[in-house]
Each structure stands twice: as C-alpha cells, then as structure tokens.
Image (cartoon, rainbow, N blue to C red):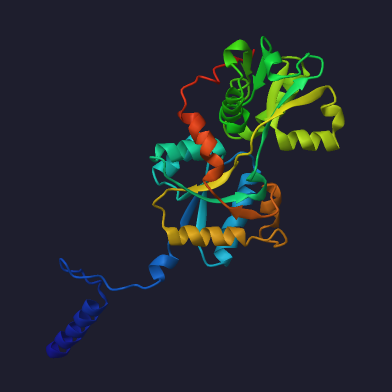
Amino acid sequence: MRDKLLSLASLIGLFLLLIAPRTLSAGEPRADTGSTATQTRVIRIGAVAYSPSAVTIFEGVRRYFERAGLPVDYVLYSHYDALVEALHKKQVDIAWNTPLAHAQYHLRAGNGSQALVMRDVDCNFRSMLIVRADAGIHSLDDLKGKTLILGSRQAAEATVLPMHFLQREGLIPSRLKILSLDGQVDLRGNPCSSEIHVLKALQEGRGQAGIIGERLWNRLSQDQPDQVNRLKALWVSPPFSHCVFTASKDFDKELAGRFTQLMLAMDPKDPLTAEAMRLEGTRKWVAGSQEGFQELLKALQEESGCCSAEPAK
C-alpha cells in the first residue's frame, strides 16, 4: 500500500512540474509568441470631454475599431492642458487635439509628433475679423483706439493665429484695446465655442471688432442673417489646420498606419459610426499633415506679447 501511495505521489509531482510556468535562465531567449502580443496591444486614445456627446463619439470609435480587429480604448480629460500632459507622459498613445494643443505638444516633444488624421472640416480653416457696421471701421488702420474682442486663449484660431497674421499685415496691438473673454467663461474643455461669446459681446456693444471662425460667419449669413446684419467682415486669415489626432514621434508606425487607415475608411452611413461622425461634424476623415500647423508653431515661438489683454468685466 505504501509503495502505491509513493507511486501516486510521484505521478502528481510530475504532473505539477509539467504544468508549472518555467522560469527562463539568464540570457535564455523567450519563445516567439507571434501575433498574439500584437493583437493584445490596446491603443489608448485621449480626448477632452467637451460635451456629454464625447462618450457617444468615442464609444462608437472604440466599437468600430473592435469590429476591425484593432482594440482601442479611450480616456477623457477635463481640459487640453491635461491631455497634452497625458500624451507627453505616454499615458495615452493618441490624442484628439485642438490646433493649439497639437502645437504645444509638438514643441514640448522637441519639435516632433505625428499628425495622423483630421476631419474634412479641419482643412483650410480660416479666422475672420468682423466689425460693427456702425463703428466706422473700413481698414485695419481704423482699428486704432478701438476695442477688439478675443475668445479663449486655448483656441488658437481665436487668439494666437489671427493676431500673428494681423501683425504680419501691419497691425500694432498696442494701438488698440483688447478685451479677452477668456476669464469670463470657463471654456478650457471646449475652447472652440468661444467664438459664440465673441459674437454676442460684439452685438452687445462691448467692443467694435472681434475674431470668429469663417465657417460660423458663413453659416449665420446663410441661415440666420438677422444675427449678422449689423456686422461686416473686414479681414480673413490665410488657411491653417484645425483639430487633429496627434501621436508621439516614436509611436509605433505600423499601429499609427493601421489607425489612420481605419479612420479614413470610416463611413457616415455605417450604423456603428454614423452618430459619432455626425456629432463630430464631419462626412469623412482625411490624412493629417504638419503643413497646416507651421504658422501656429512660428507664432508660439515668437515673443511678441500680442495677446496680452484686459480681462472682461
């Protein structure tokens, strides 16, 4: 009986030895796991929760990528400073950035990043200088002594870029008053909406001129002309790029290419992504490029103090 128990114990011991994980000796190569490791790599997308719809948008994106066999997850932040920090610390792989956030990260990363994907509406974006029709402003020279209303400092299209372009055309900021709405409304989570507040302040007579986006002006002129009938466009900026999916310069190029390929293939008629694309205001995604951010990068590196402003009261 004792011999039988010993034999049984030996068999159990051998079985446990066979199924136990083996520790590799120093210098011993690991077994090639093939594509399994690649398949389990989850791309982390960072974005700002600029509205409740952000969850709907990125949940649709996550499910779309899951169906295509490329797992992604998303992390939402309260503002773009936090998102830039997260991308810099590699807490996320890809960030859905405003132009300013993209440029800030690019400079912080030693003038290096990947501009992966943009919406169709992010190409050839322009800012406009609009003025009250009763202000007697017919040229940039007429702005002397007048009040120019600017929106969120987090929105490059509302502050940094238009002032950069205007100075290049001869505008001297010290000769006019600048009223910033940045401290009046907390727009760090949705800086692109600040143009609405600029328009409202201009209509209320808090200034004689303001900066808004060309698309907003065109839309209101066509659909709500009563909103702009006491205003006129004085100047339009050169084109630049707007929002973009940013990755670090050393983010895996194969994964970056796969991410871009799938975004470009997204169909607004696909039930899985139709709502996400509608909420993002796009009919198609296009390949990103650094070209449209060059003027913004130059503007950020200039020490002109062009956007110092009197806080709104």
Across and down, in percent, residue 84 comes to: 47, 39
Q: Is residue 78 above or below residue 208?
A: below
| Residue situated in front as seen by the camera: 312 or 156 | 156
22 horizontally vs 66: left or right? left
The quarter of the picture where residue 47 lies is top right
In the depicted view, which residue is nearer to us: 141 or 40?
Answer: 141
Marks counted in the figure total: 0
Residue 19 position within the rendered picture, expressed as x and y whole percent measured from the top left: 27, 77
- What residue appears at the point 73 percent right and 16 percent down from the top-left corner? 208
Instruction: Between residue 132 and residue 294, name the one nearer to us.
Output: 294
Q: Which residue lies furthest to the top in this view?
A: 145
Q: Residue furthest left?
A: 3
Answer yes or no: is residue 211 visible: yes
Residue sitting nearer the eye, 289 or 260: 289
Q: Residue at x 55, y 50 (%)?
A: 288
Q: Residue visible at 16% across and 68% down?
A: 25
Quadrant of the image containing the C terminus: top right
User: Which image quarter holds the N terminus?
Assistant: bottom left
Q: Does residue 63 appear anywhere in the picture?
A: no
Q: Where is residue 107 in the image (x, y as percent from the top left)?
A: 43, 37
Please say if 211 is above or below 290.
above
Q: Position of residue 33 (x, y in %)?
A: 34, 72
User: Where, by quadrant of the figure, is residue 263 drawn?
Assistant: bottom right
